[in-house]
Image: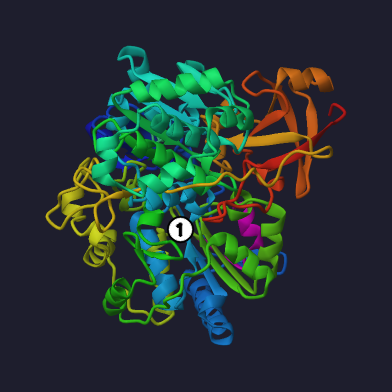
Amino acid sequence: AAMRNTRVRRSKTVCTYCGVGCSFEIWTKDRHILKVQPSEGPANDISTCVKGKFGWDFINSPERIKKPLIREGHTFREASWDEALSLVARRFMEIKAQHGPDSIGVISSSKCTNEESYLMQKFARAVIGTNNIDNCSRYCQAPATQGLFRTVGYGGDSGSIHDIAQSSLVVIVGANPAEAHPVLATRVKQAHKLRGQKLIVADIRRHEMAQRADIFFRPAPGTDLVWLSAMSRYMFDHGYAKADFLAQWVNHVDEYRASLEPFTMQHAAEVCGVPIETLVSVAEAIAAAPSMCILWAMGVTQHCAGSDTSTAISNLLLVTGNYMRPGTGAYPLRGHNNVQGASDFGSMPGWFPGYEKVDDPAARARYEQGWGVKIPEAKGLDNHEMVNAIYEGKLRAMYLAGEDMYIADANSNYVGGGFEKLDFFVVQDCFFTPTCRFADVVLPASPSLEKEGTFTSTERRVQRLYQVLEPLGESLPDWRITTALANKMGANWTYQHPSDIMHESASLAPMFAGIHYDRLQGFDSLQWPVAADGTDQPLLYTEKFAFPDGKARLHPLEYHAPESVEDDVYDLHLNNGRLLEHFHGGNMTGRVAGIHEETPNPFLEVSPELAADRSLVSGQWVRLTSPNGHLRIRVLVSDRVQGKQIYLPLNTLFTDATNMLTGHHTDHDTHTPAYKETPVRMEVLPET
Ligand code: SF4
């Protein structure tokens, strides 16, 4: 037994799935995962969900890419690292020489570590010489960040999961945490059930949290800005606005109040299709609550008005004085485990690590000096603009890490058509994803269990993961690949360990000044901003808002109806979101046998009314068609959806993905695709 036990290892890691940031010990013997043991995770204590507990077998999948692959005609052949990286370096340098540095785009991954996203933006800015660097927060929470930048200053949750649990009122708008952020949802469920916390849910779909809510209402798609603004007006009109708080801490109060003139309750009831009595009861509950947190996700952000609606949420929190205290604040729920960190560490076209703008001369000078290069002043292209730039002939090559962009970006047919036009396309991933089919070179990357580094969760919590297993085959951690590629292109990067990268980042980005691996041992964590002495901020805005004068800013808004709406031809409203068991395209969870058996097939939720109207039964095949494409899917009749609203999980497991249907509209401020504004039509297929 003693001999056998010597091969059992316990290593601390951080979940690779959602942004809650659960951490736990993982027991392994050779490459076998024996068990996942949560014990003292700062976000999760002893909890995990099904994905964190059982979702790891993909690491040993026979489909892992184990060697670099180089395209030959319509197929790929295996190659050595030296050959593959030499080819990539040569082609990038040729394209840069011929078309300029801005003809190359770089996209980092929200599955990569903070250190890896830092290196990807450094690679773009210092080695290629472009600000064309982005990450997939462009597909989810960039509008939430924009709403917070406008109003309170920091692009992150204003407190901790602990704060949500102790709030008197939780309002959830366009989010489904019971499936998308399960451990966080458990905290809310407990507080609601056991401690009298009030719960209000606004959503078009009656998901589990909606069923539990004290008040649940269904605003028409794309109208949340209207009822949120009506709430703010109601607070002023009825003397509920927190006058002392506003006077001391908030700018533009009069201008904002004047802008609320159109947003009466009557108007909101008409536009949103919600009874006025319901809206008034919501307003009274908000006014009566000693503390309120508002949680939101992609039901808000993936609309043409995603940034403005996120701003409306923050405006309401300011009007009601729900910032600067425990149990209050704004909580955009982060989807991927490190989507927060990918943005924080500078994989953004307009921002350096720690949210300093690239056109800020002082910040740019600091990075130019630190890296010994010149950095362009102008903001680069975001990933939506990159695809358009391919069609315009301006973007000729891409380096894409850990992102199944063909499946994840809206309008897959358009994105794939763009990839086909690229002169040179490098994809770095653990699996041969549908996106890899368009690549010229595929570089095999290692998943989280095979590397060291840090992740930052939705509550701005930076946590360390330790290497549990050796990289499979010849795969390598992304930071090693990017370092090797940079050095092939003439850089002299000498990082031996991710802690070296974090050290460099801390020396350049004031927001991370005190982040050091010594302070992140084991389960120790830090919530940014972290001062040089190591003081972190579990609760933001305790002493001031993050603007030069310390005051928040109310931001006037106008309502514009959704651009892409149902008509006679495309008569159904397609909504999409997550499932508990699976994660996104299914590249990981689809390769975990137990999870795949549990939920093997994608399905389309159809309301009982629509089913009756079209003579549909569960299990029947239908074809959905939009102006952008079509897919086949089986029907599940469910009263979670109503009327002509249908719901497709975005985890469509490699094929027939939602984004075959989604279109080209985006949020006006951030270019986040308006995934939730997709009219489609449905044909019933003969049984197959
Ligand atoms: Fe992982 Fe999120 Fe589940 Fe926690 S709640 S175990 S972070 S997927």
Q: Which residue carries the number 1 mark?
A: 475
Image coordinates of residue 413 in percent, x first then y, are 72, 55
Q: Do we see residue 583 in this rendering?
A: no
- Quadrant where the C terminus sits is top right
Tell me which residue sits at (32%, 75%) in the image: 361
- Quadrant where the N terminus sits is top left
Image coordinates of residue 649 in percent, x first then y, are 61, 34
Q: In the displayed orientation, state which residue is furthest to the left.
A: 533
Question: 647 or 280, which lies in front?
Answer: 280
* Quarter, ligand 1: top left
Please tell me whether residue 70 is drawn above or below residue 206 in the rendered image: below
Left or right? Give the position of 499 relative to 482: left
Image coordinates of residue 479 in percent, x first then y, are 38, 62
Left or right? Give the position of 220 relative to 538: right
Question: 589 or 72, which lies in front?
Answer: 589
Image quadrant where residue 489 sits: bottom left
SS at circle 1: loop
Tell me which residue sits at (29%, 41%) in the image: 246
Q: Do we see residue 650 in this rendering?
A: yes
Q: State which region is magenta.
A: 433-443
Tell me which residue sits at (33%, 47%) in the image: 456
What's the amino acid at mark 1?
Ser
Left or right? Give the position of 131 relative to 222: left
Question: 571 or 509, which lies in front?
Answer: 571
Image coordinates of residue 612 in percent, x first then y, are 80, 17
Image quadrant where residue 353 sits: bottom left
- Mark 1: few, some, or many residues within 10 Å (few <14, many ≥20)? many
